Amino acid sequence: MRDAQTKWDFGFCFQGGGQSVDFLDALNKKRVTAIGYEFLEDKAEGLPLVRAMSEIAGSAVLQIAGEYLSSPNDGQGVILGGVTGVAPTKVVIIGAGTVSEYAARAALGLGVDIRIFDDHIYKLQRIKHALGAQVYTSTLDEAALMISLKNADVLVGALRPEKGRPKCVISEEMVQHMKSGAVIVDVSIDQGGCIETSEMTSHVNPVFRKYEVIHYCVPNIASRVARTASLVISNILTSILMQVGDEGGIHEMIYSNTWFRKGVYTYRGSLTNLALAKKFNMGYKDLNLLMAARV
C-alpha cells in the first residue's frame, strides 16, 4: 500500500519463522515500513491476530490428530475421545496459551483424557478458569511429563517462544518412549518448534514417522481453512486501516498509537524489532526514539 500523505510504502505480513537477513535487508533497502501481524497489539496489550489464528489452530489440532490416529492413515486405529466400555484416548498439551485452550475445549467435548503442561502457574490457572472444568495441569516437571508421554496417544506442542527464542522442552529421548502410532502435532513449528524431533513439513507432505511416532509439523495450521482465516484477518485489519486513514497516514498512525507501533519491524531503512535484530545479529533502532525525534 502507499500512504498518499507521506509517500512511504508499507505492508502487513505474518513473519512466523521464515525471516532471513536477505529479506530484512531488502525491506530496509526499499525503505519499506513493514508491520508483522504477530507483533501488532491492541489497546488492551493483547495480540489480536495471533489470538485469532491460535483459536483456529487450536480448534483444528484435534481434527488433525484424529485423522492420523485412524487405521487408513496407519495410525493406532483408535477413536479420538471415548465410547462406552472403552478407555478414552489420552492427549498431552504443552503450553497453556490460546492454542491449548481451544484444543482443550475440543478435547473435553470429545471426552478425551487431557493433561496440560506449562512453566507458568498463572497460565495454568488462567486456562483452568477459561475452560470451566477440572483438568490435569502441571509445571514442566520432567518425571511427570515422561510418565504422561509414555501413555499419550496425542502430543500437542503449543509453546510460544520467549523473547523471540524457541524453547524445546520435549527431548528426543522422550519421543522414543512414546507409543508406536502416537501422533505429535507441533503447532509451534512456525517459531522453531518445542519438540526436538520436529522437522517442518508442508500440506503436500504433512507427516513423517520417527521412532514409529507420527509427526505433523505443518506451519501456519490456520491455512488449512484459508477462507475462515482470511475473513478473520480482514475483520481485524479493516478497522485498523480505517483508523490509519482517520489519523492522516501510516506515519501519524505509528506516532500516535503505541499499540500499533509495536507491530512495526522495519521503518525507513532501519530494523526496529529487537528480537529480530538479536536473532540475525543486525543493527537495531528503537522506534520510540525515532518517533520522539519525528525523523
Image (cartoon, rainbow, N blue to C red):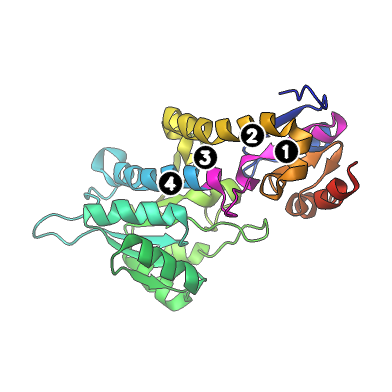
Amino acid identity at mark 4: Glu
Q: Could you give the CA–CA distance between mark 3 and mark 1, rounded to whole angstroms? A: 28 Å
**Mark 4 Cα-neighbour bin, 10 Å: few <14, some 14–19, many ≥20:** some
The answer to which of marks 4 and 1 sits earlier in the sequence is 4
Q: Are marks 3 and 2 in contact (CB under 8 Å)?
A: no
Q: Are marks 4 and 1 in contact (CB under 8 Å)?
A: no
Amino acid identity at mark 1: Met
Q: Quadrant of the C terminus?
A: top right
Amino acid identity at mark 2: Gln
Q: Residue at x 81, y 39 (%)?
A: 267
Q: Secondary structure at mark 4?
A: helix
Q: Secondary structure at mark 2?
A: helix
The answer to which of marks 3 and 2 sits earlier in the sequence is 3
Residue under numbered circle 1 = 253
Amino acid identity at mark 3: Asn
Q: Could you give the CA–CA distance between mark 1 and mark 2, rounded to whole angstroms? A: 8 Å
**Nearer the camera: disc 3 or disc 4:** 4
Question: Which stretch did the figure color magenta?
Answer: 27-50
Residue under numbered circle 4 = 55
**Nearer the camera: disc 4 or disc 1:** 1
The answer to which of marks 3 and 1 sits earlier in the sequence is 3
Q: Secondary structure at mark 3?
A: loop
Q: Quadrant of residue 26?
A: top right
**Nearer the camera: disc 3 or disc 2:** 2
Disc ID at residue 220: 3
Residue 95, position in %: x, y? 47, 61
Disc ID at residue 243: 2
Residue 233, position in %: x, y? 52, 34
